Image (cartoon, rainbow, N blue to C red):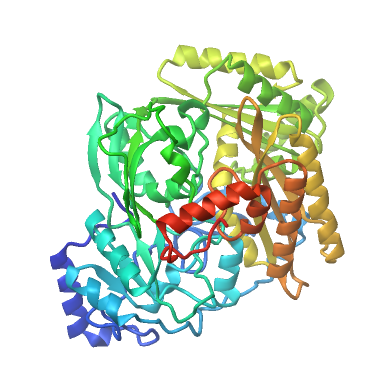
């Protein structure tokens, strides 16, 4: 299971021979190192179909046609690729006041990258093992960052002070053990790499001790399904398996992981567990902790694994899942035993307009706590978030559609008392095989919504609402082309605290932008992503025109820190969903912990990794 076909030893030999015999085909603008010695290296580059300085695939991006209509390229996404978005351009021009004819050009490449520090003793120790290693600039750069706005901005307009000195592709658990032992013996730093889809700067190399060699462990060659038990409902996989590929294989057998994270197409299962990521279907299949039955983790002091256990129903002793979410700071996960579920054949979306964000929250709290229906996912966007959902409309304007919109707006305002500028939108995803039962759930959802002034908005709008959050990174990169910068933050809060937290964070962002002379005022959209008995998770999406700013990235970081501080002061958490902590939220996360908890985490690090082999410096 992988984004690319695994290379056999013979294929690699053929590739090496071709590069040796056909020097004329070599890229003259890059240093061509070969795996034959530390002074030479073959470019392996397992991200060939992905952008080097942006999110996602090279063939997928936003652009304008000759009429000025926004559309997306490519053919990878059925509900997104090669679609026209007629409302997107006017919305962007009105909201961010950007001139879409003015381009902010990105640098064609990073001119100068730091030369690799090569620990020859380490290299000589792993070379005879047949482990693939690269010192090529292209490989090193692609493994030295994730997809955060700050990282993408630096790729487009700046540089990185440090990137990995080499990239290694282990193929087995045993090879990982050899690499970690050699790293321990010769004091080489290791940073595990899944697929580079994190947005919390988790992959950036520490700047301390610049002479110490740091290697990136790309786990994607370890992508096999080792075992599938239909009777016991679990699958054993190697940690480098891309989650989307695993999901496709499981569905062929009638099963599913129950995951649908926003970065599912790029995430490896090991990366998901390492970041302790969550998903939109968790209301039906449970938290990530309930999905992982067992795992193997290689640390500098040995391999951690619960021997012979294939059930998550264990109540004896401390919970080994304390190691979840350690973000590559203690070791590298090589194998996972995951719970699977029967795959539902039917997926229905129900969307409802509400007169206010407050009413929408009351509706979500009701269905979360009373559990009248079984639902897979729930979303709620405020009025600015609703504008963004409407901007992703792919319907071609016609006289009939325009007339329909006029009638709909009249009906919502005059008959249902829903005012444009105040109303919000909720969407519920329900899965199952029994169509009659799903129809009954839809009816029940509508009846509960009416209690809070809700009006059914239809299937298509609900589906689009779930879709938009998955495609926002492509829009983020498009905005960078036109002097606008955007980002997102996630948090959790109790039901009684959600509205207060949202208002205070939005006020802080707005006031900070005003002090920084940002005009017009920033866009701030709020989305509820997950709901629980006790509260909800919140995602803030914000952006602003940066045409006249000397340091857009510095201002973005300032706004982010102000927002994080307010989230903590308003009794919220600083992370949820797919993001993790990394280095981006490290200070705020540390501030949220009591000193005894910090000491426990430090002592675990000291016990498992006393010489800081896993040196990414995430978390604390």
Residue sticking out furthest to the left = 10
Q: Quadrant of the C terminus?
A: bottom right
Residue 329 in view (yes/no): no
- Viewer-proximal residue among 270 and 446: 270
- Tell me if residue 380 comes above or below residue 342 in the rendering: below
Q: Where residue 497 sits in the image (x, y, percent)?
A: 76, 34
Q: Where residue 140 sits in the image (x, y, percent)?
A: 41, 73
- Tell me if residue 374 comes above or below residue 131 in the rendering: above
- Tell me if residue 16 comes above or below residue 229 in the rendering: below
Q: Where residue 39 sits in the image (x, y, percent)?
A: 30, 86
Q: Where residue 137 sits in the image (x, y, percent)?
A: 40, 78
Residue 405, picture quadrant:
top right
- Tell me if residue 300 comes above or below residue 366 in the rendering: below
Q: Is residue 476 left or right of residue 571?
A: left
Residue 118, picture quadrant:
bottom left
Q: Is residue 613 left or right of residue 73?
A: left
- Viewer-proximal residue among 294 and 384: 294
Residue at left offset 40%, top offset 76% = 213
Residue 64, picture quadrant:
bottom right
Q: Is residue 433 left or right of residue 83?
A: left
Residue at left offset 73%, top offset 24% = 362
Residue at left offset 28%, top offset 54% = 222
How many marks are shown on the rendered structure?
0
Residue 209 in view (yes/no): yes
């Amino acid at each position: 299971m992988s984004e690319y076909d695994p290379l056999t030893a013979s294929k690699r030999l053929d590739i090496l021979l071709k590069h040796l015999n056909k020097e004329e085909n070599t890229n003259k603008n890059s240093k061509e190192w070969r795996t034959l010695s530390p002074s030479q290296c073959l470019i392996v580059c397992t991200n060939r179909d992905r952008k080097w300085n942006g999110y996602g695939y090279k063939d997928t991006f936003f652009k304008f046609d000759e009429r000025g209509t926004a559309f997306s390229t490519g053919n990878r996404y059925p509900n997104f690729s090669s679609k026209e978005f007629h409302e997107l351009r006017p919305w962007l021009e009105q909201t961010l006041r950007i001139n879409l004819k003015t381009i902010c050009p990105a640098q064609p490449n990073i001119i100068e990258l730091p030369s690799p520090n090569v620990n020859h003793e380490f290299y000589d120790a792993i070379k005879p093992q047949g482990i693939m290693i690269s010192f090529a600039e292209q490989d090193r750069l692609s493994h030295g960052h994730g997809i955060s706005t700050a990282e993408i901005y630096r790729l487009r307009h700046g540089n990185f002070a440090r990137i990995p000195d080499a990239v290694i592709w282990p193929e087995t658990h045993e090879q990982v053990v050899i690499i970690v032992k050699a790293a321990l013996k010769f004091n080489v730093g290791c940073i595990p790499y899944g697929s580079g889809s994190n947005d919390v700067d988790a992959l950036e190399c520490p700047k301390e001790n610049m002479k110490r060699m740091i290697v990136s462990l790309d786990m994607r060659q370890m992508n096999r399904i080792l075992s599938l038990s239909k009777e016991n409902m679990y699958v054993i996989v190697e940690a480098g398996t891309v989650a989307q590929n695993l999901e496709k294989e499981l569905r062929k057998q009638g099963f599913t992981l129950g995951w649908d994270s926003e970065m599912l197409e790029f995430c490896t299962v090991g990366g998901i567990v390492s970041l302790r990521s969550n998903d939109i279907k968790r209301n039906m299949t449970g938290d990530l902790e309930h999905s992982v039955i067992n795992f193997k983790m290689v640390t500098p002091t040995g391999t951690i694994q619960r021997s012979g256990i294939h059930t998550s129903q264990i109540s004896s002793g401390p919970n080994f899942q304390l190691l979840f979410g350690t973000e590559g700071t203690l070791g590298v996960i090589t194998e996972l035993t995951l719970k699977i579920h029967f795959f539902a054949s039917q997926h229905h979306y129900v969307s409802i307009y509400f007169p206010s964000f407050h009413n929408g929250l009351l509706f979500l709290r009701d269905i979360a706590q009373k559990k009248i229906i079984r639902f897979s996912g729930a979303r709620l966007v405020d009025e600015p978030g609703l504008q963004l959902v409407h901007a992703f409309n792919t319907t071609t304007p016609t006289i009939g559609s325009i007339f329909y919109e006029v009638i709909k707006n009249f009906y919502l305002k005059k008959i249902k008392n829903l005012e444009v500028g105040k109303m919000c939108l909720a969407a519920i995803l329900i899965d199952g095989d029994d169509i009659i039962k799903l129809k009954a759930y839809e009816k029940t959802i509508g009846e509960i919504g009416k209690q809070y002034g809700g009006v059914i908005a239809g299937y298509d709008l609900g589906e689009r609402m779930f879709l938009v959050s998955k495609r926002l990174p492509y829009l983020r990169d498009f905005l960078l082309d036109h002097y606008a910068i955007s980002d997102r933050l996630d948090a959790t809060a109790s039901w009684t605290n959600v509205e207060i937290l949202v208002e205070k964070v939005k006020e802080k962002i707005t006031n900070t932008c005003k002090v920084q002379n940002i005009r017009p005022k920033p866009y701030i959209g709020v989305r509820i992503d997950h709901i629980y008995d006790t509260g909800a998770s919140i995602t803030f999406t914000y952006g602003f025109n940066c045409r006249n700013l000397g340091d857009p990235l510095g201002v973005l970081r300032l706004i982010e820190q102000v927002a994080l501080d307010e989230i903590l002061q308003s009794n919220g958490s600083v992370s949820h969903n797919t993001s993790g902590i990394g280095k981006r939220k490290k200070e705020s996360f540390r501030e949220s912990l009591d000193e005894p908890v910090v000491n426990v985490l430090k002592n675990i690090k000291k016990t498992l990794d006393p010489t800081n082999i896993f040196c990414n410096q995430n978390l604390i």
